[in-house]
């Protein structure tokens, strides 16, 4: 039986392969604008989008509601990415035992 973190990781991978949404706060092909607002729904993972016009530099969070484009310079974005990376590294450590 898979543990809850493995299930969340699998969902994050699947979501990262799927492009969702239509408004400016959700990824659709790419983020053309970003939000500075804190995300209040559970975040399952993230990916980085580099600037390649018309796409802007962004952190795209994978949430239960779909992908959200966030401004990469926001403190809360940086903190959330660090938190997700720590969780990912813990999971890698556990699964390599």
Image (tube, grey):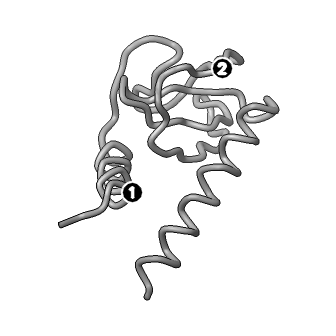
Pinpoint residue 64: horizontal percent, then vertical percent: 36, 29
Give residue 10's quadrant in the image. Answer: bottom left
Q: Which residue is drawn at 58% across and 31% down?
A: 55
Q: Distance between the residues labelled 1 and 2?
A: 23 Å
Q: 19 or 80, which lies in front?
A: 80
- In screen coordinates, is 62 left or right of 82? left
Q: 88 or 59, which lies in front?
A: 88
Q: 45 or 19, which lies in front?
A: 45
- In screen coordinates, is 75 left or right of 17? right
Q: Residue at x 17, y 66 (%)?
A: 1
Element at label 2: loop
Element at label 1: helix
Pinpoint residue 43: horizontal percent, then vertical percent: 49, 35
- In screen coordinates, is 96 left or right of 75? left
Residue count near mark 1 (Cα–Cα under 10 Å), binned few <14, some 14–19, many ≥20: some
Q: Give the numbered dot on residue 52.
A: none
CB of mark 1 within 8 Å of CB of mark 2?
no
Q: Which residue is drawn at 75% across and 41% down?
A: 78
Pinpoint residue 85: horizontal percent, then vertical percent: 62, 58
Numbered marks: total? 2
Q: Earlier in the sequence, mark 1 or mark 2?
A: 1
Up-down: is 2 above or below 96? above
Pinpoint residue 21: horizontal percent, then vertical percent: 36, 20
Q: In which quarter of the image is the C terminus?
A: bottom left
Q: Which residue is drawn at 64% across and 44% down?
A: 50
Q: Mark 1 points at which residue?
A: 5
Q: Name the residue under label 2.
A: 38
Give residue 72's quadrant in the image. Answer: top right
Give residue 38's quadrant in the image. Answer: top right
Up-down: is 41 above or below 88? above
Pair 1/2: label in front: 1
């Amino acid at each position: 039986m898979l543990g809850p973190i493995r299930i969340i990781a699998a969902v994050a991978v699947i979501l990262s392969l799927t492009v969702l949404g239509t408004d400016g706060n959700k990824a659709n092909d790419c983020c053309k604008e970003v939000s500075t607002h804190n995300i209040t729904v559970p975040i399952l993972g993230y990916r980085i989008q580099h600037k390649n016009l018309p796409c802007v530099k962004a952190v795209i969070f994978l949430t239960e509601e779909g992908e959200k484009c966030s401004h990469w310079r926001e403190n809360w974005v940086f903190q959330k990415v660090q938190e997700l990376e720590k969780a990912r590294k813990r999971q890698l450590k556990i699964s390599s035992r």
